[in-house]
Each structure stands twice: as C-alpha cells, then as structure tokens.
Amino acid sequence: MMSPTQFEKENEARWQRLEVLLNEVDAGKTNANVEELPQLFRQVCHDLSVAQHRMYGSRLVGRLNTLAIDGYRAIERRISGGWEKLVMMVFKDFPRAVRNERGLFWFCMAMFWLPFLFLAAWSPFDPEWAMSILGPQGMIQMEMMYGKNTSPLDYMREEFGSNFAMFGFYIYNNVSIDLRAFAGGLLGGVGSILIMVFNGAHLGAAVGYVHHACNPETFYSFVAGHSAPELMGVVISGMAGMRLGLSLVKPGQYDRRTALVLGGRKALVLITGAALMTAFAAVIEGFWSANPFPPMVRYGVGVIMWTLTLGYLFLCGREKSHEA
C-alpha cells in the first residue's frame, strides 16, 4: 500500500491547483480555467475517501476535508445566484469568454466576413453570383422589400401585421441560425464553419443584389440599427460551435469525454451570450427598424450600436490585473 508521503507527493500538484482556483473564485477572478473546478472537486473527494479509508493521519485528512468543503461551497456559489448570476454572465463572463478565445474569434470573423465582403463587392459587377445564391424567391423578396419604389415597412406590415409578430419571427429565425451554428460544432467544427461561410455568402449576395436591382439607401437605413448585435451574434455562435469541435478534435491532456464536458461549459457561455445578442437585435428590428424614422437618424443609431457592441465585447468586464 502507498505510504502517506507517497500519496501526498503523487497528488500534491492537483491539490495545489485546486487551492489556486478556490483563491481565484474567492477573489472574484473568474476565468475560463475555473471550468476545471468541478473535475478537481470530484478528484479531491475521491482522494479524501482514500485517505480516510487508509488512515493516512489527521493532518492529511484534515487538509483534504477542507479542500472538499471549500470546493463544494465554490461550486454551489457558481450554480446559484438567479438574476445576479445572469447579470454577471452578461457583463463579465460572456465578454471575457469571447476575449479568452481571441484566436477562434478572429478565425470565425474571417469565415463570416470574407465571403460576405467578396460577394457584396463583386455581385454588382457580376450579379449572376448573387442570383444563383439567392434563387428566384430570394430575388423577388429583396425587390419587394428594397425595390426602387417599395418599402420594407410596407412589406412587413402586410406580411406580419404587427411589430410584435415581426419580433417573434426574427427571434425564431435568427436564434435558430445561432443554434445551428453551435450544433454544427459536434461535427468536429466543420458544420459551424459551413454555416458561417454560407450565412456570410448569402448576406453578401443580398447586399450585392440590392446594389444591382434595388435601392441601397432603403436597405442600409433599415438594417443599420440592428446589424451589429445580429451579425456578431452569428460569429460568436460559430465560436461556440468551434469550441465544441476543437474539444473533440484536440482534447489535449484529457480524454475526449472530459474535454467535451469542459469545452461545452466554455461554449455554453458563448452561445448563451450570442443568443441574447441576437434576441436584442430582434427587439430593435421589430420595434425600431420597422418604424419610419429618417435615414440619417437610422444611420446614427447604427454607428452607435456598432460602437457599443464592439466596446462591450472588447472592454466590458476587463480587469487590468487579470487580463494584462
């Protein structure tokens, strides 16, 4: 049987890691690494059981007992809190999670924005690209909403009947795109990439077709207010899916099941924040964009929304000592 000294030496690094995480939780310095806490808590409970069974002495058993109690309290605080936890997630955990995955963020930005910008810029010169992507029904819908002598407000009033009905449709449609991008991550991340590229290409084709056959001012003034949270929500949903996919493809020091659980916790924060951003965009689209405000007012609101959205993602919840 292993001696108490050997047992302590073999597991000391893991216990010290748990102590560090517990100190971070007590200090309010939550970050992505704290997702290790449940696994380390389970392991220390097992170690405590082994130490008690083998009667390794009061000093070692007492230390492990203290670690187990502190770990339980820390986890209990993290899974409770109600509205306080939601506010913490929105204003701290979510923007920090985006910044902690900065590599994935810029990769997903490229997957979405490169096809968008290419098709938006090229389609006015060669509209066959946009037509093939949008299809006949998509072209008809774009012309009915943003044509030379049409208005998206009239089209949506006829289509939905009320602002609340428009809001409900946008919630269903846009959040479902986010969830598909997230679920696509289970295919090793490939599904998330395809959904981001497709949505970027489809939106870029729509913009290009507007310049070819419709009224660009009508289009831009309508989408200006809600575009920032809606489009960034798609990108971050892809990030969440990619985090799941990478947990399966590159589990690192963990087995794939454990890596998927840890990656899923990180991804959950990302997809929850992305869905909230998309829901907020639906509120703006249903209750602001669908009203007849002057174009310059709409553009001004659009600039403000893009500034606030990017400032929120890159600055909100930042701690100098923690993220230096």
Image (tube, rainbow, N blue to C red):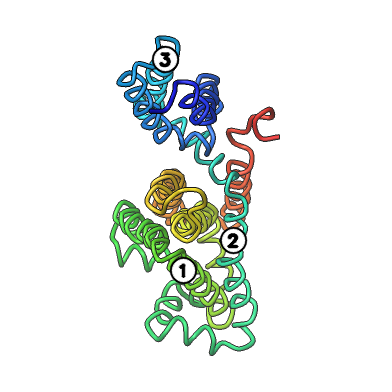
First in sequence: mark 3 vs mark 2: 3
Element on which disc 1 rests: helix
Question: Which residue corresponds to the image point at 60% horizontal and 89% vertical from the top-left?
Answer: 126
Element on which disc 3 rests: helix
Q: Residue tagged by mark 2?
A: 109
Mark 3 or 2: in front is 3
The label number, if any, that marks residue 198 in the structure image = none
Element on which disc 2 rests: helix
At label 1, counting other C-alpha atoms closer than 10 Å, the crowd grade (few under 14, some 14-19, many 20 or more) is some
| Amino acid type indicated by mark 2 | Met
**Residue 291 shows in the view:** no
- In this view, 306 is above or below 183: above
Side of 137 where 108 appears, left or right: right
Are circles 3 and 1 on residues that touch, CB within 8 Å? no
First in sequence: mark 3 vs mark 1: 3
Nearer to me, 280 or 289 = 280
Mark 2 or 1: in front is 1
Are circles 2 and 1 on residues that touch, CB within 8 Å? no
Nearer to me, 284 or 314 = 314
- In this view, 148 is above or below 189: below
Q: Residue tagged by mark 3?
A: 66
State which quarter of the image contains the N terminus.
top left
| Amino acid type indicated by mark 1 | Val
Question: Which residue corresponds to the image point at 36% horizontal and 21% vertical from the top-left?
Answer: 51
**What is the distance, in whole Å, between disc 3 and disc 2 at their CAs?**
45 Å
Nearer to me, 167 or 267 = 267
Q: Residue furthest front?
A: 1
x and y percentages locating residue 178 in the rendered image: 41, 58
The label number, if any, that marks residue 190 in the structure image = 1
**What is the distance, in whole Å, between disc 2 and disc 1 at their CAs?**
15 Å
